[in-house]
Image (cartoon, helix red, strand yellow):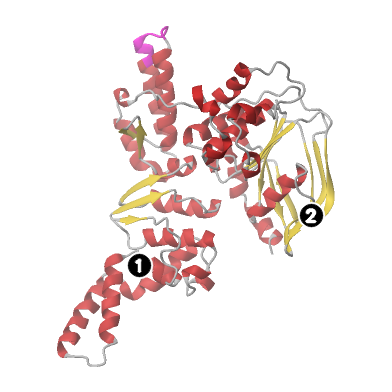
Amino acid sequence: MAILKQNQFEFDEETVLNTVMIGHTKLWKVAKEREAIYALADFTEEDGMRAGELEGEFGEMGGYTAESDAGTLLGELGVGEEYHQSLMKDIPSNLKVRVLLAQAIFGNPDILLLDEPTNGLDIETIGWLENFLADYENIVLVVSHDRHFLDAVCTHVADVDRQKVKIFTGNYTFWYESSQLMARQVNDKNKKVEEKRQALIDFIARFSANASKSKQATSRKKALEKLSIEEIEPSYRKYPGIIFQPLREVGNQILNVDKLTKSVDGRVLFKDVSFSVNKGDKIALLSRDPLAVTSFFNIITAEAIADSGSYEWGTTVTHAYLPQENAQYFNGTDNLMDWLRQYVPDHVKDVDEPFLRGFLGKMLFSGDDVLKTTNVLSGGEKVRCMLSRMMLQSPNVILLDQPTNHLDLESIQSFNEQCTDYKGIILLTSHDHTFMQTVANRIIELTPKGIIDRLMTFDEYLEDDRVKALKEEMYK
């Protein structure tokens, strides 16, 4: 059994290659004993016999190709060869996560336990991991908030709710949609039992047919075909009510960006960024440099200054921003009611307790929760407060920098659905593949040599050969 280690400092004094090979516990133990015997000054006949045994075991376990196998695995996870002989303490923290992931996978364990394995990975590396695990022949137990990842690798879902664990057939989307359908069925008193039953049978058949399009979903498809509708249960989980209601529609002039350029410590984040936002746009912003998009958001919300260039918002625009870092909003010890009250816009009158409780209640702060002070909030609670603040603004443009950070799956699902249905303008960046794919209808990539701007979905952008070739040019 192998576990994805969470302590990034555990192997500080080991090389990157050795850290990966430590993942194959038996092989590593044999390798160390073998090294110790060959290092002996007085090599006895008994030592020779033991060395022979160890050589046999070492060979059977693939010891002679272990270093090159580990190197290949690291390369596929985006850890370049120049790091392989470096000590773990000397490599960037985002690469440490990948090395520990390689360690867990190395040695083909019978049971693989992965806790949030996509954290710190880019879209391409997550895609590689999805394909690797989908074809993995042994058992994988994974905890993740990445719905696209769960859909790609899972054949079953274990729902931990109300101190009980229940196993359901299918991936995350099947579990979510079937449990929601069943919940609606339970509440629908008008439908006849047989109609409800047929609706569930049709749902299973439809989902099974879709799943079969993917070569990775063969075992899941077989399991779905054996599924009886009695195994589907309604979900009793609580989902927040994230609802942005624009006070007015945007005009024709929304946002014009002209030759914006930004560098940090001599590193060009983006250069000559020019584009106009049009009605109906839901734009996914990308960059290989994660600081680039955050800096862009900070510039167009007047929280930072560009090196050169300009931007202009239309007069009809009311924008609300969800920043990636929100610590500056929670410095005091106000309770949630008082905290939210300070962000009520001027046009809103009659701001009484029920009014504020309504916005906080949508974010699942009920009863005495609204009297919590802001200095004791968890990361997820802070994001939900920020969403209450955004909803108060009645924005017709929303800016989202990593909106799923710190949120649980219920909040992510609700947020995603609201953004899909939202009639206003969205500019977002996210590590959540499903969020980007289901919301965005336009992709803009910020690079050190300008932008790539395409009217297409996120998946289309990732798969477009012309875009891939252009990206290589833009990041040279």
Q: Amino acid at mark 2?
A: Thr
Q: Residues within 10 Å of mark 1 (few under 14, many from 20)?
A: some
Residue 225's place in the image compared with 72, above or below, is: above
Front-lying residue, 352 or 70: 352
Residue on which the image places disc 2: 261
Residue placed furthest toward the bottom: 42
The magenta stretch spans which residues? Answer: 189-196
Q: Determine which quarter of the picture holds residue 92.
A: bottom right
Q: Residues within 10 Å of mark 2 (few under 14, many from 20)?
A: many
Q: Is 190 included in the stretch rendered in magenta?
A: yes
Residue on which the image places disc 1: 22
At a point 38% along the width and 12% down the height, the residue shown is 195
Mark 2 vs 1, N-terminal side? 1
At a point 40% along the width and 37% down the height, the residue shown is 171
Tell me the distance, in whole angstroms, between the alpha carbons under discs 2 and 1: 45 Å
At a point 35% along the width and 11% down the height, the residue shown is 193
CB atoms of marks 2 and 1 within 8 Å:
no
Helix, strand or loop at label 1? It is: loop
